[in-house]
Amino acid sequence: MHRVILAGVVVTVCGAWFAVADDGVAKKGDAGQLPAFEPVMSTHSLMEEQGRHFENMLDLLRDKDAKNRFKRLNHEARALAEMANINGYHKGSREHDDYRGWAAQLKAEAIQFADLAKAHNVDDAKKLARQMSKTCKACHDKYAS
């Protein structure tokens, strides 16, 4: 009896998970079921995390012998993309179109970088990393204190 109940719970939880989080994104129409997104990190802490992921990406670009190099590059780039995505939800960013624009640009660049890493395209990834640095600098020149 307990196994039947446990199996039912597992099926229900897995079904709910796949309905909401297929490919890591909520499906269209789920918005009424999901709570409003509220970041839990300060903008400063978020920026530190973005910087950490970007530095990890640069280190992995330089280290040709790193274990699981391309898998890790892909992970770090996608983590950076998510951090940039979260940036657009912060209270202060809602008041600044340019800030949200840079966050969206960095997100798109990081996703593109992840795809280059997946394809083992180091040369283009290095060029894109330079562009990403320029995106960060443009925002930091205006908003970093």
Image (cartoon, helix red, strand yellow):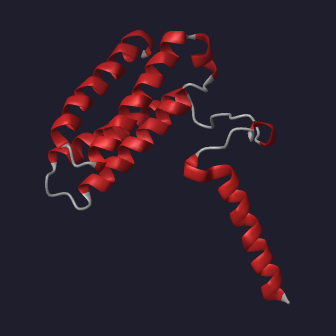
Vertical relation: 128 (above or below) 3:
above
Please name the residue shown 20% across and 30% down the image: 127
Quarter of the image where the C terminus is located: top left
Is residue 119 or residue 51 the one in the foreground?
A: 119
Please name the residue shown 18% across and 42% down the image: 122
In the picture, residue 139 is in which quadrant?
top left
In the picture, residue 55 is in which quadrant?
top left
Relative horizontal placement of residue 92, taking residue 127 as reference (left or right): right
Q: Position of residue 50 (x, y in %)?
A: 41, 35
Is residue 50 or residue 97 the one in the foreground?
A: 97
Quarter of the image where the N terminus is located: bottom right
Vertical relation: 121 (above or below) 141:
below
Q: Position of residue 13 (x, y in %)?
A: 73, 65
Please name the residue shown 44% across and 43% down the image: 79
In the picture, residue 33 is in which quadrant?
top right
Relative horizontal placement of residue 15, taking residue 121 as reference (left or right): right
Q: Residue furthest bottom?
A: 1
Q: Position of residue 117 (x, y in %)?
A: 28, 46
How many numbered markers are drawn?
A: 0
Relative horizontal placement of residue 72, taking residue 17 as reference (left or right): left
Q: Residue furthest front?
A: 28
Vertical relation: 9 (above or below) 62:
below
Q: Position of residue 59 (x, y in %)?
A: 22, 44
Vertical relation: 75 (above or below) 87:
below
